[in-house]
Image (cartoon, coloured by chain):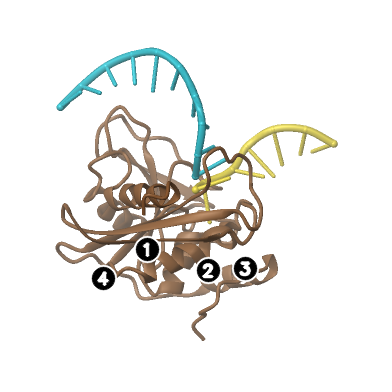
Chain colours: A brown, B yellow, C cyan
Amino acid sequence: MNKTEWPATVEALMAAQHELAAAGPEPWRPAAGPLVGGCFAAFPKGYAGPGAAGDPVWAGAAVYQRRRRVCHATTSDTAGSPYRPGLLALRVGPVLDAVVRLLPRWPDVLLVDATGRDHPRRAGLAVQLGAMLDLPTVGVTHRLLLAEGEWPRDERGATSPVTLAGDVVAYWLRTRQGRRPVAVHAGWRTDPDVAVRVVSACAKHRTPTPLREARRLARAARAGAL
DNA sequence: GCGACAG
DNA sequence: ATCTTGTCGC
Protein backbone atom coordinates (compact mmCIF):
# COMPACT_ATOMS: atom_id res chain seq x y z
CA MET A 1 0.00 0.00 0.00
CA ASN A 2 3.03 2.32 0.12
CA LYS A 3 2.69 5.14 -2.36
CA THR A 4 5.55 5.75 -4.75
CA GLU A 5 4.11 8.40 -7.05
CA TRP A 6 3.41 11.92 -5.90
CA PRO A 7 -0.23 12.96 -6.39
CA ALA A 8 -0.49 15.27 -9.39
CA THR A 9 -4.00 16.62 -8.93
CA VAL A 10 -5.74 18.49 -6.12
CA GLU A 11 -8.20 15.62 -5.61
CA ALA A 12 -5.47 12.98 -5.46
CA LEU A 13 -3.35 15.06 -3.10
CA MET A 14 -6.22 15.71 -0.74
CA ALA A 15 -7.06 12.01 -0.67
CA ALA A 16 -3.42 11.20 0.12
CA GLN A 17 -3.40 13.81 2.88
CA HIS A 18 -6.46 12.24 4.50
CA GLU A 19 -4.75 8.85 4.44
CA LEU A 20 -1.55 10.28 5.92
CA ALA A 21 -3.46 11.96 8.73
CA ALA A 22 -4.99 8.62 9.68
CA ALA A 23 -1.73 6.65 9.42
CA GLY A 24 0.01 5.70 12.67
CA PRO A 25 3.69 5.12 11.88
CA GLU A 26 6.10 3.99 14.60
CA PRO A 27 7.38 6.98 16.57
CA TRP A 28 11.08 7.70 16.01
CA ARG A 29 13.54 8.70 18.71
CA PRO A 30 16.92 10.32 18.04
CA ALA A 31 20.00 8.32 19.05
CA ALA A 32 23.33 9.97 19.92
CA GLY A 33 24.98 11.87 17.06
CA PRO A 34 22.21 11.38 14.52
CA LEU A 35 22.60 12.18 10.83
CA VAL A 36 20.40 15.22 10.32
CA GLY A 37 19.47 16.23 6.80
CA GLY A 38 17.76 19.25 5.31
CA CYS A 39 16.21 19.97 1.92
CA PHE A 40 15.13 23.18 0.24
CA ALA A 41 13.54 24.31 -3.04
CA ALA A 42 14.55 27.63 -4.64
CA PHE A 43 12.70 29.55 -7.35
CA PRO A 44 14.13 32.16 -9.72
CA LYS A 45 15.11 35.51 -8.25
CA GLY A 46 12.45 38.15 -8.68
CA TYR A 47 9.54 35.73 -8.56
CA ALA A 48 6.54 37.00 -6.65
CA GLY A 49 3.12 35.57 -5.97
CA PRO A 50 1.97 31.97 -6.27
CA GLY A 51 3.78 31.21 -9.51
CA ALA A 52 2.55 28.62 -11.99
CA ALA A 53 2.96 25.04 -13.14
CA GLY A 54 6.16 24.73 -15.14
CA ASP A 55 8.17 27.23 -13.09
CA PRO A 56 11.82 26.18 -12.95
CA VAL A 57 12.91 25.03 -9.49
CA TRP A 58 16.26 24.01 -8.01
CA ALA A 59 16.63 21.84 -4.94
CA GLY A 60 19.48 21.26 -2.51
CA ALA A 61 19.95 18.73 0.28
CA ALA A 62 22.66 18.31 2.89
CA VAL A 63 23.37 15.84 5.69
CA TYR A 64 25.19 16.78 8.90
CA GLN A 65 26.54 14.75 11.78
CA ARG A 66 27.42 16.87 14.78
CA ARG A 67 29.05 19.90 13.14
CA ARG A 68 30.29 18.17 10.02
CA ARG A 69 28.68 18.01 6.60
CA VAL A 70 28.59 14.37 5.59
CA CYS A 71 27.26 14.73 2.02
CA HIS A 72 25.08 16.85 -0.20
CA ALA A 73 23.16 16.87 -3.49
CA THR A 74 21.41 19.23 -5.88
CA THR A 75 18.97 18.82 -8.73
CA SER A 76 16.44 20.81 -10.74
CA ASP A 77 12.99 20.31 -12.20
CA THR A 78 9.85 22.25 -13.04
CA ALA A 79 7.12 22.97 -10.50
CA GLY A 80 3.99 20.87 -10.77
CA SER A 81 1.57 23.68 -9.92
CA PRO A 82 1.32 27.17 -8.50
CA TYR A 83 1.65 27.55 -4.75
CA ARG A 84 -1.60 27.21 -2.88
CA PRO A 85 -1.84 27.01 0.91
CA GLY A 86 -2.44 23.40 1.93
CA LEU A 87 -1.26 22.08 -1.44
CA LEU A 88 2.47 22.82 -1.33
CA ALA A 89 3.24 19.19 -2.17
CA LEU A 90 1.93 19.68 -5.69
CA ARG A 91 4.52 22.42 -6.26
CA VAL A 92 7.70 21.05 -4.68
CA GLY A 93 7.01 17.51 -3.40
CA PRO A 94 8.62 15.67 -6.33
CA VAL A 95 11.77 17.80 -6.56
CA LEU A 96 12.45 17.55 -2.81
CA ASP A 97 11.87 13.81 -2.95
CA ALA A 98 14.33 13.58 -5.85
CA VAL A 99 17.12 15.59 -4.25
CA VAL A 100 17.01 13.55 -1.04
CA ARG A 101 17.19 10.31 -3.03
CA LEU A 102 20.37 11.62 -4.66
CA LEU A 103 22.17 11.75 -1.30
CA PRO A 104 24.86 9.06 -1.14
CA ARG A 105 24.11 8.66 2.56
CA TRP A 106 20.58 9.19 3.83
CA PRO A 107 20.00 11.00 7.12
CA ASP A 108 18.31 9.56 10.21
CA VAL A 109 15.93 12.52 10.25
CA LEU A 110 15.12 15.13 7.61
CA LEU A 111 14.35 18.82 8.12
CA VAL A 112 11.77 20.17 5.69
CA ASP A 113 10.86 23.77 4.96
CA ALA A 114 7.11 23.19 5.55
CA THR A 115 4.54 22.47 8.23
CA GLY A 116 3.56 19.02 9.46
CA ARG A 117 0.38 18.58 11.46
CA ASP A 118 -0.38 22.31 11.18
CA HIS A 119 -2.43 21.79 8.05
CA PRO A 120 -6.12 21.74 7.04
CA ARG A 121 -5.96 17.95 6.70
CA ARG A 122 -3.22 17.41 9.30
CA ALA A 123 -0.74 16.31 6.66
CA GLY A 124 1.56 19.11 5.56
CA LEU A 125 4.49 18.53 3.23
CA ALA A 126 6.87 17.61 6.06
CA VAL A 127 4.58 14.69 6.92
CA GLN A 128 4.08 13.58 3.33
CA LEU A 129 7.74 13.82 2.29
CA GLY A 130 8.68 11.64 5.25
CA ALA A 131 6.09 9.05 4.31
CA MET A 132 7.20 9.02 0.67
CA LEU A 133 10.86 8.62 1.61
CA ASP A 134 10.20 6.41 4.63
CA LEU A 135 12.26 8.84 6.69
CA PRO A 136 11.43 10.61 9.96
CA THR A 137 10.92 14.33 9.33
CA VAL A 138 10.62 17.63 11.19
CA GLY A 139 9.08 20.76 9.71
CA VAL A 140 10.69 24.20 10.13
CA THR A 141 8.84 27.35 9.03
CA HIS A 142 8.89 31.10 9.56
CA ARG A 143 5.12 31.29 9.97
CA LEU A 144 2.17 29.12 10.91
CA LEU A 145 -0.44 27.86 8.47
CA LEU A 146 -3.56 27.38 10.60
CA ALA A 147 -2.28 26.77 14.12
CA GLU A 148 -1.77 29.47 16.73
CA GLY A 149 0.66 30.25 19.50
CA GLU A 150 2.33 33.23 21.18
CA TRP A 151 6.06 33.77 20.72
CA PRO A 152 8.39 32.65 23.52
CA ARG A 153 10.57 35.04 25.54
CA ASP A 154 13.61 36.44 23.79
CA GLU A 155 16.22 33.97 25.00
CA ARG A 156 18.02 31.27 23.07
CA GLY A 157 16.28 27.91 23.54
CA ALA A 158 12.97 29.38 24.75
CA THR A 159 9.88 27.61 23.40
CA SER A 160 6.12 28.12 23.40
CA PRO A 161 3.39 25.73 22.26
CA VAL A 162 1.58 26.01 18.95
CA THR A 163 -1.86 24.44 18.94
CA LEU A 164 -4.49 23.45 16.41
CA ALA A 165 -7.95 22.54 17.72
CA GLY A 166 -6.48 21.95 21.16
CA ASP A 167 -3.57 19.76 20.03
CA VAL A 168 0.05 20.85 20.31
CA VAL A 169 1.29 20.40 16.75
CA ALA A 170 4.48 22.48 16.90
CA TYR A 171 6.56 24.82 19.06
CA TRP A 172 7.92 28.25 18.47
CA LEU A 173 11.65 27.96 19.16
CA ARG A 174 13.98 30.87 19.75
CA THR A 175 17.12 29.58 18.03
CA ARG A 176 18.88 32.93 18.41
CA GLN A 177 18.36 35.67 20.92
CA GLY A 178 17.18 38.91 19.36
CA ARG A 179 15.78 37.20 16.27
CA ARG A 180 12.29 35.98 15.50
CA PRO A 181 11.64 32.41 16.53
CA VAL A 182 11.15 29.57 14.05
CA ALA A 183 8.18 27.21 14.12
CA VAL A 184 9.31 23.61 14.65
CA HIS A 185 6.66 21.11 13.57
CA ALA A 186 5.95 17.48 14.30
CA GLY A 187 6.43 15.59 11.03
CA TRP A 188 6.50 11.95 9.93
CA ARG A 189 7.18 9.72 12.96
CA THR A 190 8.06 12.72 15.13
CA ASP A 191 6.19 14.67 17.78
CA PRO A 192 6.68 18.34 18.65
CA ASP A 193 9.07 17.58 21.53
CA VAL A 194 11.36 15.41 19.42
CA ALA A 195 11.21 18.08 16.72
CA VAL A 196 12.50 20.73 19.12
CA ARG A 197 15.29 18.46 20.36
CA VAL A 198 16.47 17.75 16.81
CA VAL A 199 16.40 21.39 15.73
CA SER A 200 17.94 22.75 18.93
CA ALA A 201 20.91 20.45 18.47
CA CYS A 202 21.80 21.87 15.05
CA ALA A 203 20.75 25.51 15.38
CA LYS A 204 23.97 27.52 15.28
CA HIS A 205 22.18 30.25 13.33
CA ARG A 206 18.49 31.14 13.26
CA THR A 207 17.89 28.52 10.57
CA PRO A 208 19.16 25.06 11.55
CA THR A 209 22.41 24.24 9.75
CA PRO A 210 21.25 21.38 7.48
CA LEU A 211 18.37 23.49 6.17
CA ARG A 212 20.60 26.55 5.81
CA GLU A 213 23.13 24.57 3.80
CA ALA A 214 20.40 23.00 1.67
CA ARG A 215 19.18 26.51 0.86
CA ARG A 216 22.68 27.68 0.00
CA LEU A 217 23.16 24.67 -2.29
CA ALA A 218 19.82 25.21 -4.03
CA ARG A 219 20.65 28.85 -4.70
CA ALA A 220 24.14 27.99 -5.88
CA ALA A 221 22.61 25.49 -8.31
CA ARG A 222 20.23 28.21 -9.47
CA ALA A 223 23.18 30.53 -10.06
CA GLY A 224 24.79 27.89 -12.23
CA ALA A 225 27.67 27.41 -9.83
CA LEU A 226 26.84 23.71 -9.48
C1' DG B 1 -17.77 40.17 -0.61
C1' DC B 2 -13.09 40.58 1.78
C1' DG B 3 -8.94 39.09 3.79
C1' DA B 4 -5.89 35.33 5.22
C1' DC B 5 -2.98 31.83 3.58
C1' DA B 6 3.56 26.63 4.71
C1' DG B 7 6.60 27.90 0.18
C1' DA C 1 9.37 31.31 -2.46
C1' DT C 2 11.71 36.34 -3.61
C1' DC C 3 12.72 41.34 -3.02
C1' DT C 4 14.03 45.08 0.35
C1' DT C 5 17.42 49.28 3.56
C1' DG C 6 19.69 49.81 7.24
C1' DT C 7 21.79 48.14 11.43
C1' DC C 8 24.32 45.50 14.70
C1' DG C 9 27.96 42.19 15.72
C1' DC C 10 31.86 38.86 14.91
Amino acid type at circle 3 is Leu
In terms of secondary structure, where does tag 3 sit?
A: helix
Amino acid type at circle 4 is Arg
Residue found 15% across the figure and 62% down from its top = A33
N-term-proximal mark, 2 vs 1 = 2
Q: Residue A137 bears which disc, if any?
A: 1
Give percent across and percent down for residue A172. 38, 42
N-term-proximal mark, 4 vs 3 = 3
Q: Nearer the viewer, residue A129 or A186?
A: A129
Q: Which residue is mark 3?
A: A13
Comparing marks 3 and 2, which lies closer to the viewer? Answer: 3
N-term-proximal mark, 3 vs 2 = 3
Labels 4 and 1 share a subunit: yes
N-term-proximal mark, 4 vs 1 = 4
For disc 3, the chain is A
Q: Which residue is mark 2?
A: A21
Alpha carbon separation for disc pair 2 and 1: 15 Å
Amino acid type at circle 2 is Ala
Rendering quarter of residue A195: bottom left
In terms of secondary structure, where does tag 2 sit?
A: helix
Residue found 39% across the figure and 75% down from its top = A134
Q: Residue A225 bears which disc, if any?
A: none
